[in-house]
Image (cartoon, helix red, strand yellow):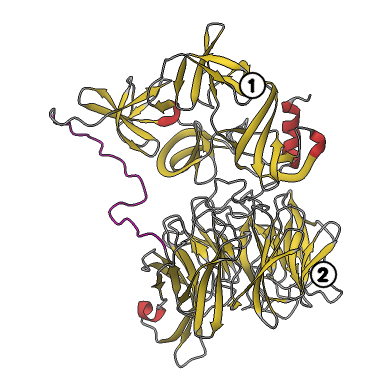
Amino acid sequence: MFKKINLLILAFIVSVSLLPAKAIKVAAAFNEGSVYQEGKYKETAQQPLSASWSKNSTNDSPIETPNVTEIFKPNYGELENVNIRLEVIVSEPVVDEDGTMYVGTRAYVADSTASIYVLYAVSPDGKVKWHIKTAKLVKGMAIHSNGNLIYNDGTVNMVNAATGEKIWSYQKSSSDTYNYKAGFMGSPVIDDKGNIIILHNDGIFALTSNGTLIDSQKLSSVHISDNEPIKGPQIRNDGTIFVINSGRIDSFSFQNNDFTTKYEYYSKSSNGMVLKDSFTLTTDGKVAYAFAGFGTTQIVNPETKETTDISAGKGRFWIEPTVYSKDGSILYPIYEEAQTLNKYDKEGGLIWSYNSRLIQSSPVIDSSGNIIFVEQQDSSNTYLTSLKQDKTPNWSVKIPGKATSNRTQPIILKDKGILVAMDSGIVKVGGQEENTNDDQSTPNPPETEPIPDPEEKSETKLITVFDETNKYDTSSFNDKSEYTVYEYTEKKDDWYKIITAPNHTKWINSTNTIEGEINNSEQTVSVTRDSFGYTKPFFHSKKTDDILKKGSEVKVYGEIGDWYLIKVDGKDVWFNQKEIKLTTFVGNKLYREPDLNTWTSGIASPQTLNVKDILITTNTDYWYKVQSWLGDVYTLGEQSGFGSIQTFTQSYNAKDIKGYDTPFSETSTKTLNGEVTLVGKWQDWYKTSENIWIKIQ
């Protein structure tokens, strides 16, 4: 048996980033694919990226026939007192965590051939929060992990998402060789280092998050006109970057700040007919799925160039196939004598065909497996349609406006609403009513709390504190005091308002607390899986040298939450037998069996996995059996620990706090001073909006 410390080194060499949906659920809100690299996008945003998803949403969609509301119609003429004869939406929106929509338009000036290009920030109720003129039409956007909005209007720009204030702009200065207007094209894509990867009419470029050029690679001929839509590059979990170049698939590695060609290019024939946007990646991590010309849809292995034809119909231009992360099946619209939506298995075999109108979007799949897409009957009748996985209809509703497949991609929101950008405005289909009496953030309680009337006693519940815990005046990290606590009267996110003395309360954070009290009744418990012993009932506490083997029976002296207390040589040992989630912070290889020789070629990115079993030999040798898109597989769990990441938003005033890339990093990457935003918590670690992990004492 090997030592885990040796495998840790191996993991750093081979680990890459996947973006799986349902089967291996990821903490990041934007993670919608099973094979894409997890870039440094704003994780709490509802839709920060549309370029590289396999179109699997972590949100539910309506099941009953939903209402339709046009929530935003652009009106630059009214805002700026300009005579505009027509204004149309030209970009897919991206949606921030609070529901703010960013969308680009083109306004045609009356009695003129001139156009004005506008970028709007729109609140969920359709009110314009800010707007700015752009140089040309907005061709793609993303929200960086630093919270700022990146947009491409031929130049690459970063603006303050709250105000629209320009932070930086980058424009290539050399002329275009191919007699097209030189400019950046499509959506900016962010890699796992925070670099911005974007396609240009003269090549592929990498910029830092500060707008500085890192490297560029000239392409033979992209051949895209200035107004032609493309989605942009796609980054596979191992860092391979795929782009469409002159009707062929090119691939690059980007390591040590340098682009190098990865695989020999692929095209269906010497003429090269891979259509610009119509490609995605399948769930096995190796095979690129492309719509090629000549009426054939193909699965292509970029390493061997082996191809599989999966349709003989004519695919819809500009529409990406959709890969269902749960089973690897592929959805793609076909049009020939009749329009259909076809579903294929991952080997390319036809599962079913659904007779449809002219489909104008890639299908999206909600968290329950329902399939949603936009279809158009004629120039005045457009519909949003929902199907079950077996193609049984859920509903189809008419939506106002005309659709074009470069902007009408449905976006499923966390309130179960679906956004669609039509030519004349943004439509929302379904969605729960917003709570107008309470915002989504957790406000700090008042600094000075009133003494309650002796006749009015707050209802209290018990809480057990297992370690010395700081007490605060508000549900945020500020003034500290130290008391012993046993009761709480209020809970807010992971904060508890506890009674410290008669008529006095303080707030504590839940890192070392469990609701309730220890049940000290003795019982015999059968161990259902191999388990470690811990000094306290928390996965972040210190492991003991004790291992409880599956099938054994132990005498338990206490129980609280999901934890049991046993005695070993007179010392307290805690163990957990309930469902476990494993959070990994680097890519982990997946194996068919607990054997290094059975690697599946799959690698799970940093994410949260469901653990079905643990096989423990010693404290340093063990395997985890986890659920994945490949079925039940095994992983060694490099740089991982139990429990999932809690998401929330909380400000914190950092004073000389060391920051780390992951909770397992041995050295600090920076020291934080000043106000930061906390967006996640794992065990006793907190994640900032800049993807830095810290501990707060």
Q: Which span of residues is magenta-colored?
A: 431-453
Q: Is residue 222 magenta?
A: no
- Mark 2 Cα within 10 Å, few/some/many (few <14, many 20+)? many
**Location of residue 653 with respect to 190 vertically, above or below:** above
- Mark 1 Cα within 10 Å, few/some/many (few <14, many 20+)? few
**Location of residue 313 with respect to 521 vertically, above or below:** below
The amino acid type found where label 2 is placed reads: Ser
Judged left or right of residue 147, residue 460 is left
Q: Quadrant of the C terminus?
A: top left
Judged left or right of residue 151, residue 464 is left
**Quick one: SS at disc 1?**
loop
**Location of residue 632 with respect to 566 vertically, above or below:** below
Q: Quadrant of the N terminus?
A: top right
Residue 478 appears in the picture as rendered: no
Residue at point 77% right, 57% down?
Answer: 287
* Secondary structure mostly seen in the magenta stretch: loop
The spot of residue 398 in percent (x, y) is: 46, 76
- Front residue of 171 and 229: 229
Q: Which residue is mark 2?
A: 267
The amino acid type found where label 1 is placed reads: Gly
- What label sits on residue 551 in the rendered view? 1
**Location of residue 457 with respect to 382 vertically, above or below:** above
The spot of residue 70 in percent (x, y) is: 40, 73
The spot of residue 109 in percent (x, y) is: 46, 87
Residue at point 64% right, 33% down?
Answer: 639
Quadrant in which residue 188 is drawn? bottom right
